[in-house]
Structure formats: structure tokens, C-alpha cells
Image: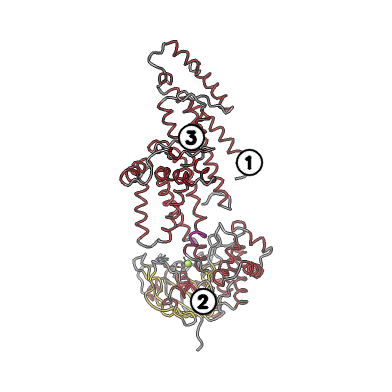
Amino acid sequence: MTQSLVAIEGLSAISTRDGGAPVLRDVSLTLEKGEVRGLVGESGAGKSTIAKALLGILPSTVKVTGGFIRFEGRDLLAMPRRELSDLMGREITLIPQDPQTALNPARRIEAQLTDGLRLKLGMGKAAAHERALQLLDEVQIRNPERVLAAYPHELSGGMRQRILIASAFALNPKLVVADEPTTALDVTVQKEILRLIRRMQEAHGTAVIFVTHDLGVVAKICDRVTLLYAGKVIEDGATAGMLTAPKHIYTSALIAAGPRYDRPNAGLEPVPEAVFRQLRAEIGIAERRV
Amino acid sequence: MTASDLLNRLFMAVLTLMGVAVIVFCLLRIVPGDPIAMMISPSATPADIAALRAHYGLDLGLPQQFGIWFMDVLKGNFGTSISQRRDVMELIGERLPATLELAFAALVFGVLAGGVIATLGTLARRTTLDPALDFINGLFLAVPDFVWALALVLLLGVFWPVFPLSGRIDPTLSTYFHTDFYLIESLVTFKFAAFGDLIAHMVMPMLALGLPLAAIVVRTLKEALAEAMVQDYVLLARLKGMSPLRLVLQEALRNAVGPTLTLTGVQFTFMIGGTVIVERIFSYPGLGNMAIDAVINRDLPLIQGIVLTFGAIFILVNILVDLIAGWLNPRGAAHG
Ligand SMILES: Nc1ncnc2c1ncn2[C@@H]1O[C@H](COP(=O)(O)OP(=O)(O)OP(=O)(O)O)[C@@H](O)[C@H]1O
Ligand SMILES: [Mg+2]
């Protein structure tokens, strides 16, 4: 068997902030080179915690209590700080959720887009500028010179997210972690951004961890999906198979609830309480956590 | 701030100063105390006193007095000091540079010291140094300028006399200055002996005025930095390999200085007020020190001149702070 790009094995974590409550329960999943994997689940399911663990930025109040994260076979959780920070931003990068807060309002786009090129690759100003123009062209931004000279507030949300995507792919990473990258955007812009991430991912051969609430988004962009509930993997498999022939009753209930199961449409069934009761019984928790 | 905004502000400033002039004039006429009584000899006859009153225009009705004074002020003539018998503008012109140099030095010290400590505290957050620093800063916040002045007199003037206790410059140096900005002049003309002596005289009053400011800068800036450091853009920059110091200085600082800048502006105007007592304690020959003499002597024209000068400084500082804030924030609006 060839080695997976990412292999999470039996990862468990607790929140010391919430009195040691489990945040991840024995989570295992793999990610192959160039593959897009969706992480879905309701709020608090642990999606962002997995994303942060992959980036080595778990908050100090979340403690890993067991398991491994292997990146190309190397144990990320046991990696020395220097090695880890060398890896992050070069081989593993992030597309953040909110383009509003992910760009520094006081710095021009050029400076922010070329930070990684200069700091990680030691590129000079001129070379970084050339590369930045190229990247903006790749994410279909017209008049790139003007955009590079602009401050974030002069650009639309969609523009900013394109820039953040360009920045995430700038160093040809092997893994991009995207934590709800379209949630903060208008529906029409969302579609473009999704298509763009897919195109960039294919062009660069990059694997993507795609965190979302939206099964419609999953259907569009993900090769495989992991469904989580209360930090536990409920179902895991190829997207098409899981959406057409779900194995778990929770998965079917979510599909029945419509693409935005967290905001059920009128006329569609919200997930019945009986399903949650069964889930809690399976996982072994007494109260539904909010 | 656009040019028309600026003109607007300047126009408002003039109106405000006129308001200040009216209030000061009225207040000074209400409070008891007669300037003439302070300057006459015991042997003066009632006729002498009446002549003096007429000489200073004090025999006229209040509205008339105000009208004459106000028209003169508009012409840039603040009248003649009753106690020193010299032109008020001239007196202020001699003293103001000393106060400006002191206040500016205290401002630079307070902002620099506060900024450095806030930065170090931000780098040291989540270590034991951080709460220790907050605790010490809390103590510093509670100590006002005149208490610092007295403590410094005891500490650096009496027990461990490293700095001269009073004055602005050692008179035995007999340096000749062309302007009243001694510190600046000695620096640009390379008179380093005089410069060193001026600095030595300035250290204690500067610390007394600057330490409270530093404490406020530390608290405000550290809070704002802590908020900025958890922003997504800082996280992204960290992932891209930016060093902790650069994260603070390049990513967080510019977005965090807004509240500190505004507060520093306010504090600076308080500090100008603080020069009155601090200059007195250190016998520093500035405007504040002269203000106390003017009040003791009921020297109405001089008091009015000094108050208007202070008022003008307050207003200019506020406009300046807004200009800098606008320049620092590319969005041109206050940070939310
Ligand atoms: N900084 C933190 N310290 C301690 N516990 C945390 C912290 N952040 C989140 N948690 C806990 O971890 C659990 C999982 O949170 P996580 O952010 O991974 O959920 P999520 O699936 O990303 O939810 P959402 O869809 O709302 O983003 C929650 O129970 C939450 O209370
Ligand atoms: Mg999340």
C-alpha cells in the first residue's frame, strides 16, 4: 500500500476550557495526494479542531489525548517546533473562513501576498512581484498591478478571497486546509470561489481538506467526505456513494433535511430528535451538547 | 481628514478659543483679589490707587474692559503684565519654549517607554512575566505626576543626587542662546556641554510627567495588541513564517495604535496642565511656573494670556492627533 499524504489515526482531544469535555473521539481518516476531502457536521462537531490540528495551531485549551497525525509519514504532533514551522505555510497552508479578517487592513495586498514567498523561499522583491502578478492572473484577477497596490478595504469580499486563495497556493503546497472558505460570501460569489478552489487544486495537484456545513458544496467539490458528530466519525466514504446510498441513519436524515441541514428549508424535514437520540446512544453521551 | 475638514476644525478652534477668552475673562473678574492691591506700597494715597486703576483700564465697566482686551487680543496684543510690567506676549514667548521642550520630551519618553513595554508584554503573553507586568503597571497607573515629582526629588535629588534638583540649565555654563528653544538649539549648534546639562535638568520633571503617560500607553496598547494578535491575518502571517517580533510590530501594531493615539492626545493635554505643578516643584522656568506666579499676583492680563496659550495648545494637539489617526488608518475611518 502506498503511503497516504495525511493519515489521522485514532485522534482524540479534550477541551480543558469546557472541563475536559471530549472534542475529538478516536478520529481516523486519510487523505491522498491531490484529493479533496470534505469535513461535514453540525456546529461543534470538531471540524475546525481537525483543521487546526493539521496546521499545528490548536488552542492551548485543547489537549490531544491520543492518536497521531502523519503527514507523508511524519508525525506532526511529535515534530520539533522548528521543523513544524518550516512545514507550515510551505507544504501545508490555510484558506481562512472570513476574507474580512484574514487580510491585514493596514498593509497593501502585495506585501501580504508575497510574505510567504519572501519569508519561506527567500525571494527578492522583484521576483516576488512577478510571482504575485502571475498568481493574481491564475485566480482571474484583472488589473493585477492596481490590486497589488490596494489596501484590503478597497476590494470586494470575493476579490479578497481570491487573493487569499492565491496566497494559499503561492508556494505549491501539498495540502491546503480550507475552513468554511465560502461561508462569509454571497451565494453567487460562493459558486465562483468553489470553482476556483477546485481549479487551483487540480492545477497544482494539491490535496484539500474542505470544512463545510453545506452538503451541496460537498457534492460539487469533494471527492470523499467525512461526517462528524460530537467529535466522532459517523460515516466516511466517496462523495457520490455517500450522498446516493448513505449507510448511517444520521447521514440520510441530513440529506433529507436539504443541502443546508443547519438551516432547514421550509417544507424539508429537520433531523428528527430520534436520530440524535440514537447517535448519542452510539457514542455514549448522555446530553446533547450545544 | 480632507482639507475642508481641516479648515472646519481650525474655524471651530478659533470659535472655541473665543469662548475660552470670554469665560476666563469673566471668571477672573468674579474671583476675589485685586491686582492693584498687590503692587501698591503702604504709603499710596487713594488718588495714587485710582490713577493706577485708570492706567490699567480697571476703572472701566466690565463689558468695556472685555471689549478693549478682546479687540487687542484679535490684533495679537495681550496687554501688559501688571506684576512684571512687560508685554504679555513677550513673556509667554520666552517661557513657552521651555515648557514645550519639557512636555515634548515627556511625551516622547512616555510613548516610547510605554510602546516598548507593551511590545515586550505582548511577546511574553502566556508567560509568568505577563501578569507580573500588568500588576506593576497597575501600580504605576495609580501614581500621579506630582507624586512622582516629589518621589524623584527625594530619590534622585537627595538620597542619590545624580541629577540637578532645579532650574533648566546651570547658570555658570553661561551659554548664549539665540532662541528660547535651548535644547533644540544646543543640539543643532553642537553645544554638547549645554545639551547634556539641559538634559540632566530635564530628566526628573520629564520622568514625573512621562511615567503616568507611559503606564497608560502600556495598558491601552497592550490591550489593543492582544486583540489584534488573535486576528486571522496574524495567524496567516505566523503560518507564513513571520517572526514573533515582526508579528507584533508589522502585523498588529498599526491596527492597534488607534485607541492609544487618541488617549495619548488627551493625556498630552493633561500633561500640559501637569507642567504647572511639576515645573513649580523643579523650579523649571516654563510657562506653567509663570502661571502660578501670575495667579499669586492676580496678574489678570498675564493669566488670560497663559490660559489662551494653553487652550490653543490643547486644540492644536487634538487636531494633530486626528490628522495622525487618519494617516495611520488607510480606511480613513475610526477602527471598529
Ligand atoms: N479554543 C477552544 N478551547 C477549548 N475548546 C474549544 C475551543 N474551540 C472550540 N472548542 C470546543 O471544541 C469543540 C469542537 O469545536 P470546533 O470548533 O472544532 O467545531 P466545528 O465543527 O468547527 O464547529 P463550527 O461549525 O461551529 O465551526 C466544541 O465543543 C468547542 O466547544
Ligand atoms: Mg469551525
Question: In this figure, which residue is indicated by the disc labeled 1?
Answer: B4
Going by the numbered disc 2, the residue's amino acid type is: Val
Going by the numbered disc 3, the residue's amino acid type is: Arg
Question: In this figure, which residue is indicated by the disc labeled 2?
Answer: A225
The label nearer to you, 1 versus 2, is 1
* Image: B110 above or below A35: above
Residue A82 numbered tag = none
Element type at marker 2? strand
Same chain assignment for discs 3 and 1 = yes
Same chain assignment for discs 2 and 3 = no
Question: In this figure, which residue is indicated by the disc labeled 3?
Answer: B95
Residue located at (60% from left, 74% from top): A198
Observer-nearest residue: B118 or B93? B93
First to last magenta residue range: B246-251
Element type at marker 3? helix
The label nearer to you, 3 versus 1, is 3
